[in-house]
Amino acid sequence: MTTSNEETCTLYTAQAPVVLDAIEREGLSFVKREYIQNKYGDQSWVFQQAYSFFAQHAPAYGDKPAYAESGIWCYCDRRWASSGAGGCLLELEVPADQAVLFDLRVWNKMLNLQYVGADEADEEAFEQTLASRGVRNHTEIFSTPFHPVLKQQVLASWQRLFDSAQDCPPEYLEAGLWEIRKEWLVGAQTL
């Protein structure tokens, strides 16, 4: 993680131009659940699983304003921040106590509705459990009512996200913010 001092961290995020407009016009931007529905359409339920977990559990690691309904995803390594043509790359200098840091590889497992094991052996054991119960795809655990115990095990495993930054190589550090404030904006460029 790039830090300019002990109290801030430099983060990068790719956002739609409307986000930059809101920051410049209103002084901040935040996410409402409806934005996720609009962005991902029929697949939004998959993202909502991980995003809802984050919104429910991350406040223990940083104050969540009442108006923020989901996190904003930022990276310590600028190469991960991309949204395709027409987006904006924002460089932010964020107070360290406003960023919830975690390993982006763990987050990606959550976005795929996967179990986050304590180690590789734990993950393999869970995969064997799935196979023995005829579960071929992790989404079945969330998209059907047939696996409530497995779903609870997966959700419980996701708590490991909040410890994942400890031994994470800096290039894999991701951060969740509840908002982007105008005073945090260092620069912006069109992608």
Image (spheres, grey):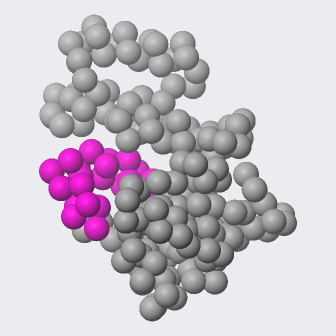
Residue 72 in sight from this viewpoint: no
Residue 41 lies within the magenta run? yes
Q: Of 32 and 53, which appears nearest the observer?
A: 32
Q: Is residue 114 left or right of residue 78?
A: left
Identify whether 129 is placed above or below 10.
Answer: above
Corner quadrant of residue 34: bottom left
Residue 191 x %, y %: 46, 62
Q: Is residue 112 left or right of residue 42?
A: right
Corner quadrant of residue 51: bottom left
Q: Of 160 and 82, which appears nearest the observer?
A: 82
Residue 108 in sight from this viewpoint: yes
Q: Which residues are magenta?
A: 35-56
Residue at image position (45%, 39%) is 108
Residue 155 x %, y %: 40, 38
Residue at image position (52%, 65%) is 89
Q: Is residue 53 left or right of residue 150?
A: right
Identify whether 129 is placed above or below 168.
Answer: above
Residue 86 x %, y %: 37, 65
Residue 75 x %, y %: 58, 54
Identify whether 125 is placed above or below 8.
Answer: above
